[in-house]
Image: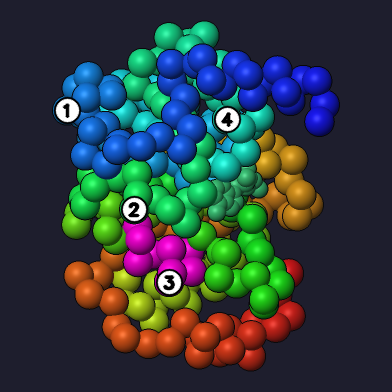
Amino acid sequence: MAQKKLQRFEDLKTLQNVLQYPLNMGGNWKTFFNNKNPITLELACGKGEYAIGLAELYPQKNFIGIDIKGNRIWVGAKKALKLGLSNVAYLRIQIDKITEYFSAEEIEDIWITFPDPQLRTGKAKKRLTHPRFLRSYKHVLHPKGCIHLKTDSTALYKFTKLVIERYHCFLLEDIANVNNEKIVHEELKIKTYYESLDIAKSNQIYFLKFSLPEFFPDISADKLLQQFLKEYEHVD
Ligand SMILES: C[S@@+](CC[C@H](N)C(=O)[O-])C[C@H]1O[C@@H](n2cnc3c(N)ncnc32)[C@H](O)[C@@H]1O
């Protein structure tokens, strides 16, 4: 492993705003932040630009960036410390295990920023807006909480809209290209590392905001996926 990466992994052990696979954190985040302010998660945070950008916009709220890659989290954690942001933390875990780290309704809002679209059908279960993930977000999210997705993937955008519709979620905002909007909310002006790379070379950024239903309908995610494939086979 490269020396720089190894050094970052060593650093992570000592940074006070980083937790790696911590035990017994569910229900204890207020103690960690030393206040009762609401908590927003940035999932797939990478270098955590949204956690930092939102923390600057909303000093009365707390933000936790979540990613599995320690060397990326390191960048956000160091920056947050340099900026003196005590309302930002980073959690190194698998998002699949999120319910082990937060208690019921402990989270006010969730942002998912440029997650891997996982385009191969066999990987669909890894998409962070797959019903499997929505069920675990439902557990940790306050009933009035919202999910915000920012992506440059047409396929992930369309897949998520289908999930929203079929799983009776409430679509609150749907922007087909943030870059074409005349007036853009400050929150959407925050740019992530992947966003600036513009891998899709489309200069097209989709945004969806939605909330979750009280109960999910009992439908098979596999059937949903088959339908998605039929309708959107040629997308991306
Ligand atoms: C394409 S990058 C985007 C990073 C950042 N949000 C950005 O826009 O620059 C996707 C990130 O999601 C993380 N990730 C994907 N699936 C994950 C999972 N199940 N648990 C934790 N992290 C995950 C990856 O490690 C990677 O850093």
Q: Residue at x 40, y 34 (%)?
A: 22
At label 3, counting other C-alpha atoms closer than 10 Å, the crowd grade (few under 14, some 14-19, many 20 or more) is many
* Type of amino acid at the residue the image marks with label 1: Lys
* Type of amino acid at the residue the image marks with label 4: Ile
Q: Mark 1 points at which residue?
A: 36
Q: Name the residue under label 3.
A: 131
Q: Which of marks 2 and 1 is in front?
A: 2
* Type of amino acid at the residue the image marks with label 3: Pro
Q: Is 119 drawn above or below residue 168 in the view shown?
A: above
Q: Gap between marks 3 and 4, in whole Å?
A: 26 Å
Point out the stretch of residues depicted in magenta: 129-137
Q: Gap between marks 3 and 2, in whole Å?
A: 15 Å
Q: Name the residue under label 2.
A: 99
Work out whether mark 4 precedes mark 2 in sequence or the reverse, and give the earlier one: 4
Residue 129 at x, y = what percent?
48, 64
Q: Does the magenta stretch include residue 136?
A: yes
